[in-house]
């Protein structure tokens, strides 16, 4: 069994100056990610309107499968024209990890 996690650091457009505007960018991203059957949530920068941290996790039988799904998620987030993907931190956990 393998688990992979990723944290996407996003720069949101300058017009996201309220929590309502921030949510209008974050919610569609979370909905899009969940279509890939991953767990996804906003996990940081809750108090910053122009930034968001989105965490994604998946569990599968093969390492290649979790990598492929997280790769797809990363490509989809990076391809969104309204936001800028600043960084991605990924970690793969296998049966040998404690």
Image (cartoon, rainbow, N blue to C red):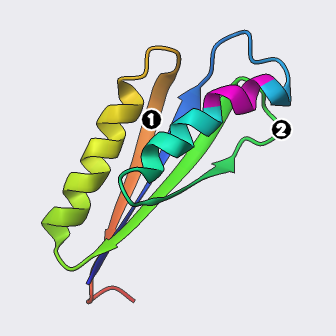
Tell me if residue 98 comes above or below residue 12 in the rendering: below
**Quadrant of residue 93 within the rendered picture:** bottom left
Which residue is the site of mark 2? 47
Q: Position of residue 32 (x, y in %)?
A: 46, 41
Q: Sequence order check: which comes first, mark 2 or mark 1?
A: 2
Q: How many marks?
A: 2
Determine crowd level at label 1: few under 14, some 14-19, many 20+ residues with C-alpha closer than 10 A.
few
- 63 lies left or right of 28: left
Q: Please give the range of residues in magenta.
A: 21-25
Q: Position of residue 52 (x, y in %)?
A: 64, 36
**Residue furthest to the top:** 15
Tell me if residue 50 comes above or below residue 6 in the rendering: above
Q: Position of residue 28 (x, y in %)?
A: 57, 34
Tell me if residue 57 comes above or below residue 71 in the rendering: below
The residue that appears at 74% across and 10% down in the rendered structure is 15
Query: What's the magenta bit mostly, secondary-structure-wise?
Result: helix
Q: Is residue 23 magenta?
A: yes
Asked whether disc 2 touches disc 1, contact meaning CB atoms under 8 Å apart, the reply is: no
Tell me if residue 89 comes above or below residue 80 in the rendering: below
Q: Which mark is residue 87?
A: 1
């Amino acid at each position: 069994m393998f688990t992979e996690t990723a944290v996407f650091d996003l720069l949101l457009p300058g017009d996201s100056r309220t929590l309502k505007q921030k949510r209008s960018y974050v919610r569609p991203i979370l909905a899009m990610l969940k279509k890939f059957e991953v767990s996804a949530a906003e996990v940081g920068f809750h108090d910053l309107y122009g930034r968001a941290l989105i965490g994604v996790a998946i569990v599968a039988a093969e390492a290649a499968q979790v990598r492929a799904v997280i790769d797809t998620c990363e490509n989809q987030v990076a391809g969104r024209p309204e936001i800028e993907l600043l960084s991605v931190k990924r970690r793969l956990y296998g049966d040998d990890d404690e």
